Amino acid sequence: MAGSAYLDNAATTRVRPEVTAVMREALEDTYGNPSSVHQAGRAARHLLERARETLASAIAVPPACLLFTSGGTEANNLALKGAMAAYGREGRHLVTTAIEHASVLDTARALERAGYTLTIVEPDRTGRIDPDRVAAAVRPDTVLVSVMLVNNEIGTVEPLSDIVRAVRAVRPRPPLVHMDAVQALGKIPVTPRLWGVDLASFSAHKIHGPKGTGALYVREGVRLVPLLTGGGQERNLRSGTENVAGIAGFAEAARLLLAEQPALRERWAAFKQRILDGLTPRLPGLAVNGPAPAEAAPHILNLSVPGVRGETLVHALAARGVYVSTASACSSHHSGPSHVLTALHLPADRLEGAIRISFSRETTEDDVDRLIAAVPEAVAEIRRPGPVRLPDPPRSLAVGPAAELPAGGAAEASRPAVAAAPAVPSPGPAEEAQPVVLVRYGEIGLKGENRRHFEHLLLTRIRHALEPWPDAAVHWSGGRIWVEPGTGGPPVLEALRRVFGTVALSPGERVPLDLDAMTRAGIRLLGAAVREDGAASFKVDTRRPNKRFPLNSLEVNRELGHRLHQAFPALRVDVHQPEVEVTVEVRDDAAYLYARSLPAVGGLPAGMSGRACALLSGGIDSPVAAWMMMKRGMTIIPVYFHSYPFTGDQTKDKVVELTRILAGWAGGRMRLWVVHFTEVQKAIYADAPARYGVAIMRRMMLRLAERIAGRERATALVTGESLGQVASQTAENIRSIAAVTRLPVLRPLIGLDKTEIMAKAQEIGTYPVSILPYEDCCTLFIPKHPATRSRPEDLERLEQGRDWEPLLQEALGRSEVLTVEAVPAPAPPVVAPVSGQ
């Protein structure tokens, strides 16, 4: 990459020549299998063990404690999975943090899905993990604590020695501590044995070594179950013939870099300050993400540039020969903001505008100065209307027809045999164009004879959502719903995204039936997609219900595609997997164009699936269950059981607030039933054996909810039960509790675990209210050992000692019915964009 400034060294580094020489010698001269007993094998074994000693010396551990892997990801997997399996009899609990590398977080979540339990510790706003918070997460059954030493996105250096000390103080036999040191080696001193760390992961390609080589430090006496079995290499912990050349290169890279470390740290610190001094005056609002630069790892600087998307800026910088990134290279292909920056609770513009700059021993002042010059220029270009300069990929990497075409390009070669195209019309003012939004409604479009009825329901809900904007209009034609937002602008889009039944929205333009007008609209829409989404390829797709239009669909594709390619020569045409698809609908009255698809909430329109009473406790689960059934088209009537004075007015207010949030999704207001349940609950715990109290209490709740459902014309009940989460939610207890009602009991959370439910609560906006520390009636009088396998006949027999009807009648008679007005719902959960109807 001569002539470029490579500043993405946290992703990978160039192999230095000295390392290449060591590896070449190993490949050409020391090619034996280290497990062989002949001379060639012994030579390879000698080189392998010498490399082990060199790397062990660099991190001050005994060579026998170091085993080699295929990289940092395998080392992290072996540490977590191997330790949890080896110590399964001592516990099944794992602690890690919200800002770990994906190879730790995803592995921890995979273990959770396999039946282990997981606690994730949140950082502070600089990414620092508090040792006391880690210690507080440790339980008697905790096997392993995993915390990275240097964060790969923001450079926070975690206090590992303090964390180890805090964890060891919790109990006499403390859990193991694993440290992901992949980003730390060669940048800061790394001494796992001195700090008391039990397991530590390393990787070669971050320090100018080869890819595909890593290592795991395993303290003496620590047991692991291997991931790979077969040959018994690496002390029976990592079978497979060792990559001697890669390991020799790893050791050489570590030896060389550690000798240079003090001088490099000073140089990198100066580079950071130079960048900040150069960019801050030219980019108002520029922000450093994570710790102060002087407190972070010396080689990483994470910045947010206001008003631009990080991905778009990365592309624009690459066009200028400056290479940075938006996040970890191992997670940058995932959609959505960085999980690390999200955990810092940064504002949305900081999340979207973040880029990571990272240095190596090869970074020069010229590289830094080139970055300082390129960033303001790229930002100005991105903010300026019109085409954005993007890098042209190598022709060998082009996808689809462009890979086989001559210099004229894909669009040129595929043009129809028509007269020479006129000059590309300027995108100019859009007086001829009218903003429109295509509403996609997925599942409804698959219905049969009832489809028209369901579309009418959705149209009604959309019109209701648009009531704050009197000049907004809704049109339905030929299975399409188009919205004219009028003066509403972006708020109209947000309102539409919250309408249940709306799967996706495509903002676009309606223009006259004229190819020049279509071209101008296409330039505006494609330009917006490039600026906002960082797109690098496109295609045109035309639908032509208006058969009187002089060009057919294929001709429109070719002609409009050629004109757009003239306007955006840096974009490539990719007819198979384009990043942007410019869709044209040629209708009788006008042409409709759109190029982006924004995800919406999905589901079915409210009222389509009838009415149900949802038991709302005030906890995390029940509001999510109610929301999920609302998404499936049900009108929900929440029912709350209030046990004053055991539960105070704060608890009731909390439930009212949760109902307000749900009403925001319902489009206005909700009826909330507040049932005064104190006397019923007191009688249960006076009469019934304590271990059966919870099950009988739930049965009484369902009896009352069924009566309320009759008054509300509801045909089902909804609960937040999740199988096995608490004592009342075993299969046996669920059966015994539901036996008292003839109505179907819908349990949308039944197969979800707590982490999944909490994530959904955060998405829909109920989580901050649900976690307020006010007890609900379900948590009162809970015995130490509740029954988990009750039978309906046993519970019926226990209930026969009292006439419950007067108590139930009194509870129902004293009930309050509140009309709760909505609060605005948050933006809908982001899902993958949906194409087509």
Image (spheres, helix red, strand yellow):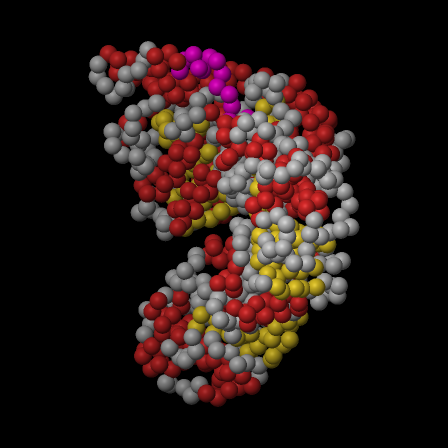
Residue shown at 61% from the left, 22% from the top: 5
Q: Is residue 567 visible?
A: yes
Q: Is residue 356 visible?
A: no
Q: Quadrant of residue 339?
A: top right
Horizontal side of residue 741 vs 763, given as left or right: left
Q: Is residue 120 above or below residue 387?
A: below
Residue 433 position within the rendered picture, expressed as x and y whole percent measured from the top left: 73, 51
Residue 131 position within the rendered picture, expressed as x and y whole percent measured from the top left: 52, 41
Query: What are the residue bounds of the magenta stretch?
Result: 9-23
Residue shown at 24% from the left, 12% from the top: 39
Q: How many marks?
A: 0
- Of 1 and 635, nearer the camera is 1
- Of 642 and 269, nearer the camera is 269
Q: Is residue 679 above or below residue 125?
A: below
Residue shown at 31% from the left, 31% from the top: 238
Residue 29 position within the rendered picture, expressed as x and y whole percent measured from the top left: 33, 11
Horizontal side of residue 301 vs 836, given as left or right: right
Horizontal side of residue 37 vs 312, given as left or right: left
Q: Is residue 530 above or below residue 252?
A: below
Residue lying furthest left in this view? 37
The reply to whether the magenta stretch includes residue 20 is yes
Residue shown at 32% from the left, 74% from the top: 791
The reply to whether the magenta stretch includes residue 500 is no
Question: Which quadrant is the N terminus positioned in?
Answer: top right
- Of 244 and 586, nearer the camera is 586
- Of 439 and 468, nearer the camera is 439
Residue 199 position within the rendered picture, expressed as x and y whole percent measured from the top left: 40, 33
Q: Quadrant of residue 822?
A: bottom right
Horizontal side of residue 346 vs 73, given as left or right: right
